[in-house]
Image (spheres, rainbow, N blue to C red):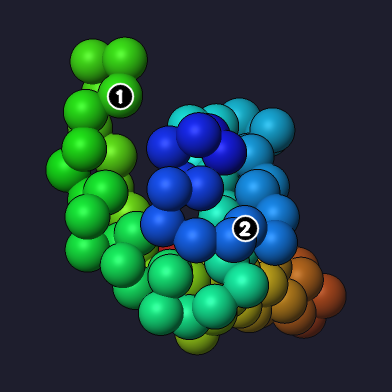
């Protein structure tokens, strides 16, 4: 990965997903935002080992939105159980 992404600038770190949910993903952090944009522009759709790269900017709002929704659903389920509410009408 350093060989592919390093062509576009200095890399601060690469984090590869190691859980079933993040398998096949990685975060590449560049020292300079312009290098990240250049890599994003040039590497999106690039074929590596018969797989095409999808290169996107990290968007923390989208990343945590699902986590927040799951947490709120869990809290709602706990409240329903606490007050013995069911969804039958």
Q: Is residue 36 visible?
A: yes
For residue 82, the mark is none
For label 1, the crowd category at 10 Å Cα-Cα, with few meaning under 14, some 14 to 19 and many 20 or more, is few
Q: What element carries label 2?
A: strand
Residue 12, placed above or below residue 19? below
Q: Earlier in the sequence, mark 2 or mark 1?
A: 2
Relative horizontal placement of residue 67, taking residue 80 as reference (left or right):
left
Q: In percent of the image, x 21 and y 38: which residue is there?
A: 46
| Circle on res. 48 | 1
Report the mark closest to the observer, 2 or 1.
Answer: 2
Residue 44, placed above or below residue 83: above
Q: Residue 5, how many percent across, how many down?
A: 46, 46
Image coordinates of residue 34 in percent, x first then y, are 41, 79
Q: Residue furthest top?
A: 49
What kind of element bears circle 1? Answer: strand
Q: Is residue 64 above or below residue 17?
A: below
Whether residue 89 is visible to the viewer of this picture, yes or no, is: no
Which residue is tagged 2?
11
Instruction: Find the distance from the CA under tag 2 to the CA under tag 1.
Output: 19 Å
Instruction: Measuring from the top left, give residue 10's x and y in whole percent.
Output: 59, 61
The answer to whether residue 33 is above or below residue 23 is: below
Viewer-proximal residue, 41 or 66? Answer: 41
Q: Position of 78 compared to 34: left or right? A: right
Q: Residue at x 23, y 15 (%)?
A: 50
Q: Would you call the spot at circle 2 few (<14 residues within 10 Å), some (14-19), or many (20 or more)?
A: some
For image coordinates 30% across by 24% down, the residue present is 48
Direction from residue 4 to residue 72 in the image, left or right? right
């Amino acid at each position: 990965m350093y060989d592919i992404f390093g062509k576009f600038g200095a890399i601060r770190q690469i984090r590869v997903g190691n859980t079933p949910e993040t398998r096949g993903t990685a975060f590449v952090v560049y020292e300079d935002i312009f290098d990240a944009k250049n890599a994003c522009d040039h590497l999106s759709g690039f074929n590596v080992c018969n797989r095409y790269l999808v290169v996107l900017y990290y968007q923390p709002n989208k990343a945590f939105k699902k986590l927040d929704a799951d947490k709120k659903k869990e809290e709602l389920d706990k409240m329903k159980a606490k007050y013995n509410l069911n969804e039958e009408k």
